[in-house]
Image (tube, rainbow, N blue to C red):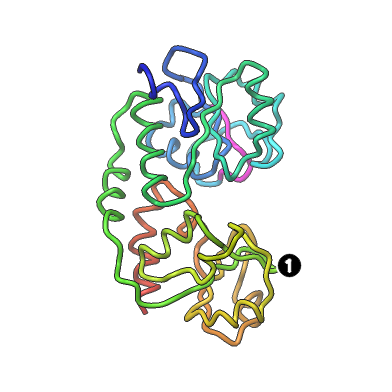
Amino acid sequence: MPGDAWSDDLGHALIHGARPRRVVSLVPSLTEALATSAPDVLVGATDWCTQTAGLELPRVRGTKNPDLNAIAGLSPDVVLANQEENRELDVRRLRERGIDVWVTVTESVPQALTSLDRIFTDLLGRSRPDWLVESHGLWAASAPIRGTAAIAIWRDPWMVVGRDTFAGDLLARLGLTNVYDDHADRYPTVTVPDIEQRHPDLVLLPDEPYVFTADDGPEAFALPTALVSGRLLTWYGPSLVEAHATLGALLAH
């Protein structure tokens, strides 16, 4: 595994020279990917890593406030993190303890798929799982653009998905342009009038990180809304297969 195969998505080289056998994941999407296709290496995960059916894993708190002592106590060969979901401070402190951290960058669907390829083939030395091969095929082509949408991720204050995000790219590949694609911020704070003035055909209300429900979210808008799975909209891993079918069917109407 010479050269770039020893470096994460940001080009940071790992210091240990063996395939990792003990992995702690600080990223729910990556935890699901490993729990599905490489459960033998997974020794710890965050409280937010909920898609681990059948696996009893030690928990190391959250993605933004991981318990660094608990992580160190698990003696991981590598910790998986994400540039967006995890804090650079925590990554740096883990590395200062001599713990390798593999940071992923996933601002688009192709970038996420490539990152997953590298974890399984470069880092773990395994073949691509069937779901990853299928995901490459499903997401290789984009649907024709047939409308626009806004993706709300929080309220009080309202926040939406802006530029250069995985969710925005996934949405575009399903045929809807994010009306905040041109915003200077990746996750801007906005108001309901601001959203409505951009005239999206649809406002998407996922169930994470804010849990929008039928009684909490749609009533704020004089626009069509749709409650969607946050996992299907924002996670990258085995969910990408289901996301293409389920969200594709929902957004086609």
Picture layout, residue 92 above or below residue 212: above
For this rendering, which residue is in front, 26 or 113? 113
Residue 87, percent from left and from top = 66, 38
Where is residue 27? Give x, y as percent. 55, 40
Side of 18 where 150 appears, left or right: right
Work out whether 253 lies above or below 185.
below
- Badge 1 amino acid: Pro
Percent x, y for residue 100? Answer: 56, 21
SS assignment at label 1 = loop
On the image, which quarter does residue 211 sit in? bottom right
Residue bounds of the magenta highlight: 43-49
Q: Quadrant of residue 46?
A: top right
Residue 59, above or below 162: above
Residue in the image at 32% along x and 43% along y: 132
- In this figure, which residue is indicated by the disc labeled 1? 157
- Residue lying farthest to the bottom in this orientation: 222
- The residue at the point 65 percent across, 24 percent down is 94
Quarter holding the N terminus is top left
